[in-house]
Image (cartoon, helix red, strand yellow):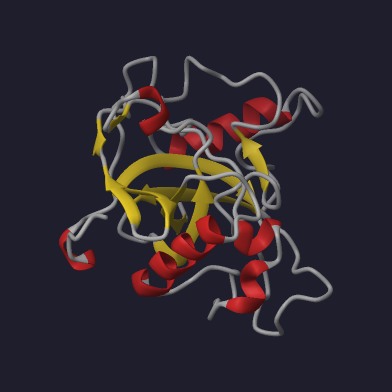
């Protein structure tokens, strides 16, 4: 069990993606107006998208290095359907989201590793990851499954990151937690509790991590 105080750890910025928020489920809490999950199961991932990833533009956390790069990716992918699409005509419902990730991997109750990030966050074109813009807005915290576990590979570092499901939205677990209007959690204490809960009675295969979702406007 990792005993490091929650407040002493800073999440790592993974990068940026173009997203379209999902409408709340019919049985969602009345507080939810949109679902802003870091998972691709509910929130529509405009870029990188669901097809063949643009590996030369992405980093090893499956994110783009800047809000500008993510927005351009949305245009490139959209041009496959509408060749006339430009930045000016991009669907205004598409948002650019940033993801920050806390360094905890939870395998079970009282079984949490603190890991070191060694994942390359520069794009494969050598573009440096840009810090969060000043006008970024924090939407909340997501508890999300990690598709590949460092522990199963005998490592204590994260060399690449690929997200799986997020039980708050994917499995309607939000009804059991104090979510906000984005179907996310506001406090790290609630996120840690949910992370351990999901491994005790897992809706999806774990392990789990805590991601922080930000909206970035231009």
Nearest the eye: 118 or 85:
118
Q: In which quarter of the image is the N terminus?
A: bottom left
> Which image quarter: residue 202?
bottom right
Q: Where is residue 94 in the image (x, y as percent from the top left)?
A: 64, 50
Q: Position of residue 170 (x, y in %)?
A: 69, 56
Q: From what the image shows, is residue 182 above or below residue 92?
A: below
> Which percent across, then down, holds residue 42?
71, 52
Q: Which of 120 and 206 is in front in this view?
A: 206
- Residue under the image location 53 percent in, 35 percent down: 147
* Left or right placement of residue 102 versus residue 8 in this view: right
With respect to residue 191, does 70 lie above or below? above
Where residue 116 sits, quadrant-wise, is top left
Q: Is residue 37 visible?
A: yes
Q: Which residue is drawn at 57% across and 43% down?
A: 18
From the top left corner, tell me how far across and down residue 83 is, in percent. Answer: 77, 24
Q: Please state which of residues 193 and 126 is positioned toward the viewer in this rendering.
A: 193
Q: Give the residue at x 48% y 31%.
A: 148
Q: Is residue 75 left or right of residue 59?
A: right
Number of numbered tags placed on the structure image = 0
Q: In this view, does 19 lie to the left or right of 129?
A: right
Residue 102: tell me if it is visible. Answer: no
């Amino acid at each position: 069990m990792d005993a490091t105080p929650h407040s002493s750890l800073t999440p790592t910025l993974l990068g940026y993606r173009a997203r379209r928020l999902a409408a709340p489920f019919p049985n969602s809490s009345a507080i939810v107006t949109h679902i802003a999950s870091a998972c691709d199961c509910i929130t529509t991932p405009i870029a990188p998208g669901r097809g063949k990833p643009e590996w030369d533009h992405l980093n090893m956390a499956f994110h783009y290095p800047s809000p500008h790069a993510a927005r351009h990716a949305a245009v490139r992918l959209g041009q496959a359907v509408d060749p006339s699409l430009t930045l000016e005509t991009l669907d205004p419902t598409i948002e650019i989201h940033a993801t920050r990730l806390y360094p905890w991997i939870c395998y079970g109750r009282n079984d949490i590793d603190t890991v070191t990030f060694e994942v390359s966050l520069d794009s494969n074109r050598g573009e440096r990851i840009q810090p969060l813009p000043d006008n970024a807005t924090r939407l909340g915290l997501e508890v999300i499954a990690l598709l590949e576990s460092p522990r199963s590979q005998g490592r204590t570092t994260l060399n690449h990151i690929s997200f799986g499901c997020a039980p708050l939205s994917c499995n309607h677990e939000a009804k059991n937690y104090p979510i906000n209007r984005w179907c996310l959690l506001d406090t790290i204490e609630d996120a840690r509790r949910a992370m351990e809960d999901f491994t005790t009675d897992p809706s999806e295969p774990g392990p789990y991590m805590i991601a922080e979702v930000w909206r970035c406007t231009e």
